[in-house]
Image (tube, helix red, strand yellow):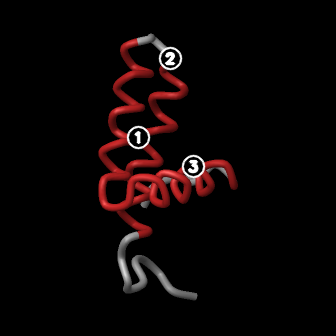
């Protein structure tokens, strides 16, 4: 399960999903790659987390432990 550091992570994922639809994960990966190329490891990790979060948000069924 990806770590969601705060509301900004969810907002970024939702924004990409609204703007790019099914290609939102690819856009998050591209942003991560750009950040890595610029040497910004913090933003690289952020966009990789967003990429994984987008995958989870596309599932219709619950994933993980349900309380």
Give x and y (percent) for residue 31. 41, 32
- Mark 1 secondary-structure assignment: helix
Q: Quadrant of the N terminus?
A: bottom left
Give x and y (percent) for residue 36. 39, 19
**Above-or-below relation of 4 to 57:** above
Left or right placement of residue 17 versus residue 42 in this view: left
Q: Looking at the image, which is closer to me, 4 or 60?
A: 60
Q: CA distance from mark 3 to mark 1?
A: 12 Å
Left or right placement of residue 35 versus residue 3 in this view: left
Label 3 or label 1, whichever comes before in sequence order: 3
Q: Quadrant of the C terminus?
A: bottom right
**Above-or-below relation of 33 to 11:** above
Residue that label 3 marks? 12
Say which residue appears at 40% left-offset and 78% top-offset: 63
Task: Give the label, 2 or 3, closer to the camera.
Answer: 3
Say which residue appears at 36% left-offset and 76% top-offset: 59
**Above-or-below relation of 15 to 57:** above
Say which residue appears at 69% left-offset and 55% top-offset: 7
């Amino acid at each position: 399960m990806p770590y969601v550091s705060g509301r900004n992570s969810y907002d970024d994922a939702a924004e990409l999903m609204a703007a790019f639809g099914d290609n939102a994960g690819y856009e998050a990966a591209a942003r991560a790659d750009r950040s890595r190329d610029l040497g910004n490891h913090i933003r690289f990790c952020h966009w990789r987390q967003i990429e994984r979060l987008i995958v989870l948000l596309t599932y219709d069924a619950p994933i993980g432990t349900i309380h």
